[in-house]
Image (spheres, rainbow, N blue to C red):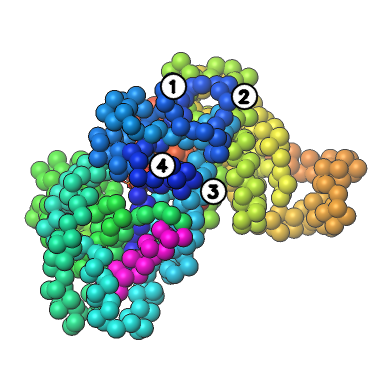
Amino acid sequence: MVGFIDMDCFYVAVERARDPRLLGKPCAVVQYPTGQRGRPDLRPEDDRWRTGGPMGGIIAVSYEARARGVTRQMSGAEAKKVCPEVILVQVPTAFGKADLQIYKDAGDAVVDLLASRCDATEKRSVDEVAIDITGAAEHLLASRAAAELGAAASAATHLADSALSVDAAKVTRSSARQGHDKQQSRDTSELADGWEEVLRRAASDPVAWRLIAGAVVVKELRQQVESTLGFTCSGGVATNKVLAKLGCGLHKPNQQTLLLPHAAPVLLKDLPLDRLPGLGGDFGQAVKSRFGVQSAGELLQVPRPDVLKQFPQRGEWLLALAAGDDSAAEAVKDRQLVKSLSNGKTFFGEKRLRSLEEVDYWLGELTGELHRRYLQQVEKHQRTPSTLQVSLTLDQKEHLTRQQPIQLGSQGTPEQILQTAKACARRAGAVSGVISLGLSLSNMIPLEASSASLSKFFGRKSEGAASKEKGEKPQEKAKAKPKEANLLGACFARAAAAQRASSDQQKAPEVDEGVLAELPLNIQQEILRELGQEPKLKKLRCDVVEIDA
Ligand code: TTP
Ligand code: CA
Ligand code: CA
């Protein structure tokens, strides 16, 4: 059984938790103004309220501001026009670009809290988490009276086949994201609608009972998130991840929806196909135009053999998805550690980088944040990266990647990252017209393994480990032992040469998807569009930015 949590106006909520003056007010978070090289950074603790001047677009809007007409696509100036009292808060910046760390940390805190009671927690974006609540629901069924559970669930939960829910499911993906009346209604008579019948039928339906207990689990978790962290969120409960997410989006903010198996066909009947995962882009368009259908219900009316003939690879999945079958959704994956840490920036049009000096400058800017996230991996997970990669997209749409081993251990410096990055960039050859620059650290290895592999090489403890015992800094030790430092250098030079030999041959014809997936969604989309490639939904996260770090 799956629960799904999506935080309400998340970046705004994070800002409100930091600054109570924003509570209850119409407010929005704006991006930093791009292309302003040399502007002083605004740290999280600085005054980041903006009243005018250069400002990026709006990326999060409080519900109070939404009610007054402010939407995400607006510029700060447009928002002020429709709602003069709106407070605009700029995202913090660090190293010359947006610094999303406070939002990421808040999202991680939510995941940590949910994990305390769930069998598995899967972070789906900066503010969305899928949770496996099977165990927690079973525990409630064993420990609380049925009447108590029924009362608790029905008081807090919309049913997905209620009239209001079905109406909320009729809007397209983009309208659903904008928020609309049906989604935001707080009609309490609607909440009671249908529950009596559901509870009566559930008496002889163990699957429904478990889901009702699941709704209580989600209600309690949401309360806990609010009382512990100060953020409200919306929730969904269903037998699978796809339906739970769908349910979660039906009623917002600070509401939850239960999608029982019998409700799925009612809800899906008029659901626009683009609300289903994987059907929001080209493939969804193709399905719609091939069969002349708009909704999941209409697709299910198409004779099965026709669907399978038109889409031999994905037809079965498509039909299962449109029917809300569990087989179309993957199980909730438990928390995964990031595979790599990446940071990137685009430079389109006049902003493209024309010289190595400019590339070096921006590598330096990218390095600072990456170094901070590397230190977090060391501290939180005792892991360290062992490969550094630089990726460049040139305005001829050529994409180059160069990588080499890097030995950061637990005390690597920004300078070490920058020098390795510069060396990689030089190996990419002549650079002119760089439209995107990416820097990533990957091949994460446990810290013990990183020192163990060295000690194996030298037949004794590694530099870092040995010098730590004597309270010396590794760098000082390295100075004192030039021979070994040279040996180490030679080791990496050999490895780098081997790597070079292999990676130079393959000028990647398209974007490195591993690296791409780690970049913020808007940058991913910009890069893909610049390369003339349609964003591929499977690879793009549905929402935002990096997982974890
Ligand atoms: P969303 O969950 O899409 O929106 P939201 O949490 O602001 O509002 P809602 O209550 O409707 O769920 O995105 C989560 C955060 O991700 C959002 O607060 C800001 C950030 N974000 C961007 O930076 N750019 C974007 O284009 C989107 C969609 C979100
Ligand atoms: Ca959200
Ligand atoms: Ca979201």
Q: Earlier in the sequence, mark 2 or mark 3?
A: 2
Q: In this view, does 143 lie above or below 475?
A: below
Q: Give the range drawn in magenta.
A: 212-228
Residue bearing the label numbered 3: 549
Q: Position of residue 302 (x, y in %)?
A: 9, 53
Queried whether the magenta region covers residue 24, the answer comes back as no
- The span from disc 2 to disc 4 (Cα, nearest Å) is 37 Å
Q: Name the kind of residue labelled 2 in the image.
A: Tyr
**Cα distance between the residues tagged 3 and 1:** 29 Å
72 up-or-down from 117: above or below: above
Secondary structure character of the magenta stretch overall: helix
Q: Is mark 1 on a helix, strand or loop?
A: loop
Identity of the amino acid at label 3? Ala
- Residue sitting at x 22%, y 69%: 154
Of label 1 and label 4, which has the lower sequence position?
4
Element carrying mark 3: loop
Residue 176 seen by the camera: yes
User: What amino acid is labelled 1 in the image?
Assistant: Pro
Which class describes the residues within 10 Å of circle 4: few (<14), some (14-19), or many (20+)? some
Number of marks present in the image shown: 4
Q: What mark, if any, has residue 22 been given in the picture?
A: 4
The answer to which of marks 3 and 1 sits earlier in the sequence is: 1
